[in-house]
């Protein structure tokens, strides 16, 4: 089945136990992002631990190509937080990680009928927003 939505992002709710309130929202990049994990980590290291609004300002002004897909993920995580009743103004990036993905292998024709293998790197990005105002409280 072909998915028409380009930024295929899903969210999962992390709860330490069943008795805790929802205070964190996760956004995962499901599609292959065609960039090196090292280049994406350069941007992720700048936003880890910062507030949501400060993160948006940083990502919009960064000159790197990796900042646009990360910006879309942060927007998506904030939208997921709004759907669950969390305030995006009180949230911050509690966890941001980049993991290497699979190689996309292409063949480039060379002289005398030979071919040369080109490996395109991909990565997986995970962004977790946590609410500052809510603490882990047990449901009564």
Image: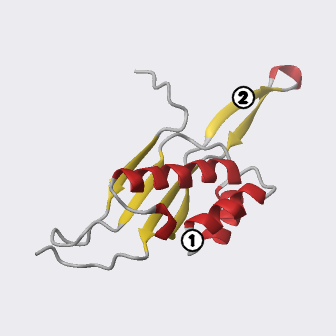
Question: Percent from the top left, x then y, of residue 108?
Answer: 78, 28
Q: Quadrant of the N terminus?
A: top left
Classed neighbour count for the residue bearing mark 1: other residues with Cα under 10 Å, few (<14), some (14–19), many (≥20): many
Q: Name the disc covering residue 27, or none.
A: none
State whether residue 106 is above or below residue 60. Answer: above
Q: Position of residue 131 (x, y in %)?
A: 41, 70
Residue marked by disc 1 = 51
The residue positioned 70% from the left and 65% from the top of the image is 42
Q: Nearer the viewer, residue 122 or 40?
A: 40
Element carrying mark 1: loop
Quadrant of the frame with the C terminus: bottom left
Determine which of the numbered discs, if any, sits on residue 107 in the image. 2
The one of 66 and 80 positioned closer to us in this rendering: 80
Q: Position of residue 69 (x, y in %)?
A: 63, 48
Q: Which percent across, then down, holds residue 93?
A: 52, 68
Which of the 4 image quadrants contains residue 125? bottom right
Instruction: Please say if 1 is above or below 69.
Output: above
């Amino acid at each position: 089945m072909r998915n028409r939505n380009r930024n295929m992002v899903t969210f999962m709710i992390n709860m330490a136990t069943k008795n805790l309130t929802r205070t964190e929202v996760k956004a995962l990049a499901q599609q292959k992002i065609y960039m090196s994990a090292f280049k994406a980590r350069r941007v992720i290291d700048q936003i880890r631990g910062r507030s949501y609004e400060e993160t948006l300002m940083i990502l919009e002004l960064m000159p790197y190509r990796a900042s646009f897909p990360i910006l879309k993920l942060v927007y998506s995580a904030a939208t997921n937080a709004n759907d669950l009743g969390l305030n995006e103004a009180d949230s911050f990036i509690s966890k941001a990680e980049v993991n290497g993905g699979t190689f996309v292998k292409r063949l480039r024709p060379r002289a005398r009928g030979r071919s040369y293998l080109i490996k395109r790197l991909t990565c997986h990005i995970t962004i977790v927003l946590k609410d500052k105002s809510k603490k882990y409280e047990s449901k009564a």
